[in-house]
Every structure is written in structure tokens, then in C-alpha cells.
Image: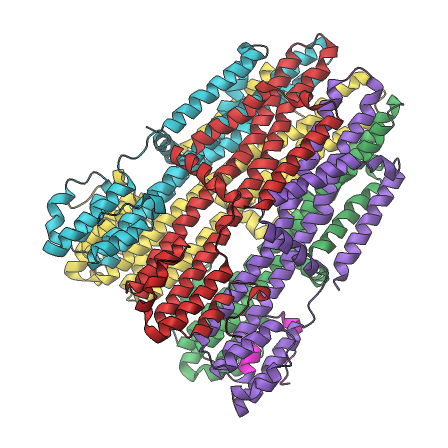
Chain colours: A cyan, B yellow, C green, D red, E purple
Amino acid sequence: MDIATIVGIISSIGLLVASMTMGVGVEAFLDLPSILIVCGGTACATMISYPLRDCLNSVSVLKHAFVTRPVTVGEIISSFTRFAVRARKEGLISLEPDIRRIREPFLRKAMELAVDGLDPEAITEILETDIAFQESRHRLGADIFQSMGGFAPAFGMIGTLLGLISMLRQLEDPSSIGPAMSLALVTTFYGAILANMVFIPIAGKLKARSRDESKIKELILQGVLSLCRGDNPRVIEQKLFAFLPPSARISAFR
Amino acid sequence: MDIATIVGIISSIGLLVASMTMGVGVEAFLDLPSILIVCGGTACATMISYPLRDCLNSVSVLKHAFVTRPVTVGEIISSFTRFAVRARKEGLISLEPDIRRIREPFLRKAMELAVDGLDPEAITEILETDIAFQESRHRLGADIFQSMGGFAPAFGMIGTLLGLISMLRQLEDPSSIGPAMSLALVTTFYGAILANMVFIPIAGKLKARSRDESKIKELILQGVLSLCRGDNPRVIEQKLFAFLPPSARISAFR
Amino acid sequence: MDIATIVGIISSIGLLVASMTMGVGVEAFLDLPSILIVCGGTACATMISYPLRDCLNSVSVLKHAFVTRPVTVGEIISSFTRFAVRARKEGLISLEPDIRRIREPFLRKAMELAVDGLDPEAITEILETDIAFQESRHRLGADIFQSMGGFAPAFGMIGTLLGLISMLRQLEDPSSIGPAMSLALVTTFYGAILANMVFIPIAGKLKARSRDESKIKELILQGVLSLCRGDNPRVIEQKLFAFLPPSARISAFR
Amino acid sequence: MDIATIVGIISSIGLLVASMTMGVGVEAFLDLPSILIVCGGTACATMISYPLRDCLNSVSVLKHAFVTRPVTVGEIISSFTRFAVRARKEGLISLEPDIRRIREPFLRKAMELAVDGLDPEAITEILETDIAFQESRHRLGADIFQSMGGFAPAFGMIGTLLGLISMLRQLEDPSSIGPAMSLALVTTFYGAILANMVFIPIAGKLKARSRDESKIKELILQGVLSLCRGDNPRVIEQKLFAFLPPSARISAFR
Amino acid sequence: MDIATIVGIISSIGLLVASMTMGVGVEAFLDLPSILIVCGGTACATMISYPLRDCLNSVSVLKHAFVTRPVTVGEIISSFTRFAVRARKEGLISLEPDIRRIREPFLRKAMELAVDGLDPEAITEILETDIAFQESRHRLGADIFQSMGGFAPAFGMIGTLLGLISMLRQLEDPSSIGPAMSLALVTTFYGAILANMVFIPIAGKLKARSRDESKIKELILQGVLSLCRGDNPRVIEQKLFAFLPPSARISAFR
């Protein structure tokens, strides 16, 4: 569970409601047609912008903003040092029973290719294509939210222009100017809220997750290649530790 | 047929008309000179910005925003595994009759080069140049729409400035300020609508199509090179599956 | 002659004059000091931004926005297939009399290097440096116009600020506010027009020309290298066709 | 201690307080709800945007904006020339006692790998991964502050919209418009101050530090590789001097 | 002396003073506190953004915006053809007396390395690192001015917000609104002037100089490598001419 996302969303809603209540009350900011223009416009523009499959994919990618991965980098490195020690003594093939117990799917797939006896070039080619396309799929999800973060303020402005054009047309009654303008600004307000509290932050979290995921997969690729080459377990650990900040490097050999 | 584009366009028009009707009515937003300034200005600026051939090309590329490709990635991968099994038994040359039945033009061309006996380096060179230039042609189409998405709000603002300068010049009658300003804002409104409901989303869809198309062509290139090298059909399938999300990998061998 | 540029410029001027005439008339938009601030400021900022030689170079590059190249890609490809057929029979040296008749300077230079007997590595090095620096020179021209497209609206805003500060200082006579503000906005109007009708579109056209020019030169480089290597004429044609869209590939061998 | 950061922060606060005092006094700019909206909103958006670990990491990276590194490039280069002279005479292994006295952790780690007898390829691989990931960690810290520099003005604008919508709703008393609008603008003011005096400059300093750090680590990598290859000490010095501006190249051999 | 920079600065000041005089006079635009906010704020933000050493370095880099280099590309190419002719007859070592007379420091250093007998790989490594870090130092100078071009309008806006908040607070006397607003806008005016007449153009000129400098150094590197390889003088000239526009290629052999 990604606590930061949850806390961030709940606090920001609380902050917003508190700010509105201190003004003229929440109901001044609720207007159904305004919500329809901003949300509907953003949804339409996004559907025209991206293939339907990618739009649906972005919904499934969205869950990555709320959950964290179960296996940590430290665990993966210590698995590799364990594998390396065993492979040196009993050969790569002896790792087969361990592989079935690996929870991390990419590590399992990489180890399977290695134990199947594919040469390092083929393993590199397969896993690098996999990393590149997984990254492009995740980045696409982030891109869609980023686009929505651009469309929302645009439709907020379109709604405000709509309101202003209507209001200025019938300027006879000056006492109605204030409330009409207030209402016109509500769409701009919605657009800014949606972009800066929802779409842009979500896109940021998805990009961060994708970056972390690619880093872990590159580490796994390096580890498997080192295993295939029969590197010394201490050298493998040194190589994989380079992916970590110095403070997180806790060696299995000391 | 790309349903997302169609649904997006129809819903956004509906949304817009509904919003206008709830205000002072649609006719307050219809003004021929305003339409001329925004659409004409955008068209002129685009014609100065891009060679005539590219402008016309962008119209023909536009259809990619509305149609989807008939052949899926899954079908292409299963063709390759079929080809690989046959080529192992009877040689690459035995694939010749199958090639004529391939619907996908790039796959057909790639297979023809392979069966003609060109060496992998020449095939890679020809197909990579083809992929790069097809991508640059498609991206150019998207770029033109992206530019139009920048010009439209600029000409909207130019139209509004035109209206404001005229209005402020003859400020004698204060009752005419409202309607004059309302009219001046209509061009800004058109510019925002055209950019955010038409040009930018269309550019986005064209970019997405170009990305998908290049991905499929890279997959075909990898597949043909593996065929030429005489790779094991299961290894070819593994290599091509790396282009797909894990959930879409349905092996022909299980 | 690039018809799109000419038509675009004439139509946009017509559009502008028509729009002004429908308002309070063209004379409301003509103000010499405003023209001086926007054009003069943009010119000064550009002179500080770029070396004098580059500013003058941009004027000479400007002509590329109005003319199109006399030799087409199709003609160059058919020249190469003709050369390849002859070179196979009579040797590269037999092409010498043809080279003098080549109109395209880069093709002539490339063929001269090949017939002089330079090795492919030296030819590649010389021609790639040539392509890279010609591209950087052309791109510089486009960059200068792009910068002017950024300076023009900035000086438009500076002029408007100047007018507003003056006007607000002497607010005694309310009837003078309208015309003074109208005049202040004229510089913003000029800045927007210059940027969106002149500088940014011209920069776009120059970039498009530079892109096309580099593509043709890369094709020539590939063709000359294939000639040196003594490739089969049909393979040369296949390689060069990859630079073209499928619809424009008209083979000389069928 | 980075004096520029300290002086910059103190002067900017002084400048701000002086400017406020010359106006209506500091208290007109102090409003607790406004501070809450801008700071709270920025904090929430940042927490949704980045994983909690990265947010906490950015706080620890923040200290790099205030301190400078204890070891200079000149000292590192002179260490390398000293090491090279000794290694030529007595072998790489003779450097072992010196290594323990090295204060710079990356230099110590690099020298340990060299003295342990790893081959240059493995050293390059380990150290380049280390440089790349340290750079990405530091850049992430800068990115977080850059994002906050984007969120702060957005929440400033959201606060102002909130105030304007409330104010326009109850426009009966015209004498209250001024103070209400003044208060509404205070959030925009906070957002601009926070972005331009705190977040964006801090992000800039962190990027500069990360750039310098990577440059020094690349220099150390080059130096260690030259040591392993047994280069002439004068050539090593020449190679490392290329990382310095000409004015800072003070040779140990003259 | 770079005439364009000098003429640009003098003309823009003249233009500005003339425009102000035609309005309410220059004194309406002079306000010491406004100057302090914009200049002081920009200076503080820049000091927080960049290490002190880089800030001071940017002042010394600033002179590159006003001077042009004494040695032209044509002179360097003709030096190389002269060197190549002599080196062919009498050997590289015979160039030693000429080297001491070379005015261009980078050419001298490159020739010294060649005459000292370093192998081409070491020369390439040393000179490419030198080019890369000189470029990064110069680009840093340009970056600092570019940042100042972003901070200046931001502090202009902060000053205007400060003025507006003060003014709106005490709205009793409507006759004071005009002059107060006029004064508030003066900081925005300063920010726009500083950014568009000083910082952004200076950054542009520094980038142009850095680009030219790197191009010349790359040419020198190519020339020295060709000399070491003992290339034919005509081929060296051909290779170096590729760095020049066709119109500037005046051969020494015709």
C-alpha cells in the first residue's frame, strides 16, 4: 500500500473543503454543468488522443499509484548471491527447484532462460526488449494522465469563456454580474484542482514507479548475465550493490 | 474503425452544444468573421510553416486517426512461429507460396527480401531505413496538427485583441461594451475549442498510431532476422513475446 | 517557387485587412511608435542574441522558405540505378563524363570523391561532416526566426506595459482611458501578428526544408557507398526506395 | 559551507520584508489560511507525485544545497599523479596502505577495486553503474524541488480563485471588494515567492552539485583506469587536466 | 569586438528612452524600490541556484558576448595544409619550431601532443574530454543568464503583486488608484526589459560562441588526427572543408 498517495489525497481533499467552508461555504463551488464541462471535455479529448486500448490500459496502470511492490531490491540481491554460491558448487542446473519458488515474475523468467541454457546474447536481447516495452507501456499510462493534466485547465478556461460570453451579452442588470462571474470562474477552479491535485501528481507517481521497476529489471538482467558468466559471488554482489545508495549496501559476506 | 475517436468527437460536440444552450443559446457563439479569423489564420500559418506536399500528406495521414489496423500483433507472431517450423523442415525457400497470401505489406516485403536470399545486414539496413522514414512521415503528420493546436489559440487571441482595440476606441456608449466584449471573446473561445477538442487530440492519436506501427515493424524485423539465422521456433516465439505485455503472451507450443 | 508560402502570406494579409476594415478601419491599427517598439526591440534583441555573421546568414537562408529544389528524389534514385548498371559493366571510372553533367552539387561532389578512388570510410567521414554542418547552418537560420517569434510578443507586451503605465499615471480624464488603452494594446497585437504570421511559420518552413535536404543528402551518401561497394543495381534501388513512401517507389526494372 | 546559498536566502528575506514594510506593512501579507492552502497543497501534491521514500530522500539531499565538498579536483589529480609514480616503481599493490587514508569515499572504493586486481572492464562496469545511479538519485532530489516549484504557483492560483469566487458571490458591499481582492491575491504572491525564492533555486543548486559530483567521479574513473593500464604519470596528468579549465591546470612536474 | 552586441545594446536603450519620452517622460518609469525588488530578487535567486564559483565564472564568460575570436577557421585550415605538406617531406617532428608561433592555444596544445608522439587514441581521449568540459563550462555561463531571464519576469510579477495587494487594501481614495497601479506595473516592466533585452539575448550570444568554439576545436582534432595518420594534404583539406559552408571553401591547391 502506498501510504503517501493515500495520505496526500485525503489531506488535499480536507484542505480544500476546509478552505471552502471558511469562505462562503462548499455549495458555492458545486455546480453540475461546470463539473460536466471540465470532466466531460477532458474525457472526450483523452479518448480522441489515445487508442481505446491505451485508455483502458491507463485505468489498470492506475493501481500502480496506490500499491508498492512486495519484493525489495535487497532481497533480490541476496537471492543472487545465494544462487551464485550454489551455482559455483553444483552448476546452474541445480537452481531449478529454487526457481519455482521465486515470487518476482521477471526474476523467475530470467532465471528460467538462464537454466534453459540460452546464450547470454539471446537472454540480453529477450530481457532488454521486455524491459523496453514494459517501460513504454507504463510510461504511456503516465503520459495519458499528464495529457489529462493539460486538458483539464484548458476545459476549465473554455467553461469560463462560455460563462463570460453569456454574461457579457446580457449586461443590463449590474447586480447579476458578480454571481455570474463567480460561477464562470468555477470551471477554471475545477480545471486547476483536477490538474494539480489529481492528474499531474498521479502521472508523477506512475513515472516514479516505472523508473523503479526498470531499475530493478536492469539489476536482474545484470545479475543473471553475471550468473551465466560464472562470476565470483563477491564480484556479483559488488556489481549489484552499484545499483543501491551506499547506505543500503549490506553485504552477505561480512 | 477507431470507436474512441468517433465517440470522443460526437460526445464533445454534444457537450459543447448542451453547455451553450444552457447559457444564452448557441447563436451567441456563432459569428462568421470570428470563425474566419481563427480558421483562416490557422490555415495560412500552417501553409507558411510546412511544404504544400506535407500539408496534403497530413490530410491523408488524418485517416489513421479514424481507422485501426486489420492485422494484430498476435496474428503476426503466430505467423512467424508457423514460418519457423516450416523453414526448419523444408528451408526458407519453401515459404514462397505463403508469402503471396500475407495481407500485411511490411511483413510481405520483409519475407520477400529474406526468401530472395539477401544477407541479414542488407535486410536490416533496408528495413530500418524504411521504418525510420515511415515513422518520420507519420510523425510529420502529427507535428502539423500539433502546430495547428498552437496557432489556433494564438489567432483566437489576435481576434480578441482586434475586437478590444476596436471597442476601446469608441467607448462613448457604455451599454455597447458588454456585447462588444462578448463578441471579442468568441475568437478566444474558438481557438481554445479547436486546439483542445480537435488539433491536439488528433495529433495525439496520430502519434499513438505511429508508435504502434513502428513497434509492429520492429517486431517483424526481429522475426525475419531470427528466421534468416534459423533460430529455434520456441526461441523466436520467446523473442517476439517480449514485445507484448505478459498477459497477451499465448504460446502456440502449450 | 514554394506556392504554399506565397499563398499563405497573401491570404493572411488579406484576412487581416478584411478583419480590420470590418471593425473601426485599418487606421486604428496603424501607429508608428508601436511599430518601432515591436520591430526595433525584436531586431535589437536578435542582434544581441546571435553573431552578426549568423544574422546576415539567416537573411540568405530566408530564400529557402520561398523556393523549392529543382532536382527530385526520384530523379536522384534513377541516376543511381543508371550509374550502377554502367559501373558494373565498365567500372566506376567510366562515370567520369556523366559526373560533369550532374546539376545537384552534393551528388556531384560525392561522385567525384568516389571516382577519385577514396576509400568508403574517408567518403563517409567527409560527407557526414558536410551533412552535419550544413544541417547545423540551416537549423541556425530557423533558430533565429524562432527566437524572433519569442521576442516579438515580449516586446509587444513591453510596449503595452509602457502605454498602461503612462495612461494610469494621468487618470484625470476618464474619457481618454478607452483610446489610450486601445493604443496600448496595439503593440501586443503587432507582437502576436509578427510571431504567428511571420516568424514562427517561416522558422517552421526552414526546418522542413533542412529536414528534406538532409534526407536527400543521406540518400546520396548511401547510394555512393553502395556504388563503391559494387552492389547489385536492384539492391541499390531497394535500399534507396526505403527512403521513399511506398506509393512513390516506381522501379526502373519493371 | 555554501556561502552563496546562505547569503542568497538571507538577502532575499531581507529584501522581501523591506519591500513589504515600505508598502502597507508586513501584516497585510500574513494570512494563515493562505499559507495553509499554498504550503499544504504543494505538500499534498508532492506526496501523491513521488514515493514516500523519495520524498524523505529529497530532505536528506537538501543538505547538499548548503554544504560544499571537502576534497577539491586539484587534490584528487595530485593524488593520482602521486599514485602513478609509486605504482610504476613498486606496483599497484604497494598503494594499499595509502588507500586507507583516502577521505573521498568514491576514490577509496575505486582504488580498492583496482588493488584487488579486478580487470578494467569489471571496474568500469561497477563504477559507471554507481555513477549513473548516484546521479539519478541526486537528480531525483532536484526533480522533486522542481515539481514543488511548479505546484506552488498553481496552488497560489487555486487559492486566489477560491477567494475571487467567494468575493464575487456576495458583491453587495462595494467597499469590501478591495480588501477581499487583496487577500485573494496573497496566495498568488506566496506561490510566486515559494517557487522563485525557494523551490526553483534549490533545485538549481542540487542539479549543479549533482553535475559537479558526476564530473569528479568520471575523473576518478578515468584516473583509476589509467593507473590499471600502467600509463605514464605525465600522460595521466594530461588526461585528468582535460577535466579542468586551462587556468586551473597546475602541473606537479614543472 | 562584437559589433552586433554593442549596436544592439545601444539601439535598444535609445529605443526605450525614446518610447518613454513620447509617453509621460522617463521619470514615470524610474522607481528605486522597484529596481531593487527586480534586480535584487534576481540576484538572490541566482546565488541560491548556482555555486558561487559558477556565478563568478559567468561574469568572466560574459566577455565572450562582446569579443570575437582573433583566428578564423580559414587560417586554421590553411595552417593544417601547410603542416601536412611539410610533415610529409620532413616528418612530424620538423613542425616543432612552427608550433611555438601558433597563437590559438588549443591548436598549439593539440600539435604539441602530436609532436610528443602520443598515439591517436590518447590524443582523441585528451582533446575530446577537453572539448566536452570547455563546452560544459561555457554552456553553464549561458545557462546562468538563461535562468536570470526566467527569474527577472517572476520577480517583476512578485513586485506587481506586492503593489496590488497594498493598493487594494486601502481603496478609500479612488483618485490614488491610477498612480498606485501605474507604479505596481513598473516592476513587471523592468522584469520584461531585463529578460528580453539583457539576459535572454546575452545567453543566446554565449551559446552561439560556445557552439562556434566547439566546432573549431572539433576541426582541430580532426586535422591533428589526419596529420598523425599521415593523410594526403589534399585529403586533409577536403576533410576540413566539410566543416565550412561551400562558399567559404578556398583551396590552397588551385
* Viewer-nearest residue: B70 or B206: B206
Q: Does the magenta segment cover residue E253?
A: yes
On the image, the x and y values in percent for residue E212 come to: 62, 64
Q: Quadrant of residue E22?
A: top right
Q: Quadrant of residue C104?
A: bottom right
Against E108, residue B142 (above or below) is above
User: For this view, does A203 lie left or right of residue A184?
Assistant: left
**Quadrant of the image for the C terminus of chain D?**
bottom right
Residue at image location 44% in from the left, 70% down from the top: D236
Q: Is residue B36 visible?
A: no
Residue at image location 81% in from the left, 52% down from the top: E11
Against B226, residue B20 (above or below) is above
Q: Residue furthest bottom?
A: E89
* Viewer-nearest residue: B106 or A57: A57
Residue at image location 79% in from the left, 16% down from the top: B175
Against D185, residue A222 (above or below) is below
Q: Does the magenta segment cover residue E85?
A: no
The number of callouts visible is 0
Q: Is residue B172 visible?
A: yes
Against D77, residue D135 (above or below) is above
User: For this view, does E137 lie left or right of residue D100?
Assistant: right
* Viewer-nearest residue: A8 or E24: A8
User: For this view, does D219 lie left or right of residue A212?
Assistant: right
On the image, the x and y values in percent for residue E149 come to: 66, 45
On the image, the x and y values in percent for residue C106 come to: 56, 71
On the image, the x and y values in percent for residue E229 come to: 47, 81
Range covered by the magenta-colored residues: E234-254
User: For this view, does C244 lie left or right of residue C5?
Assistant: left
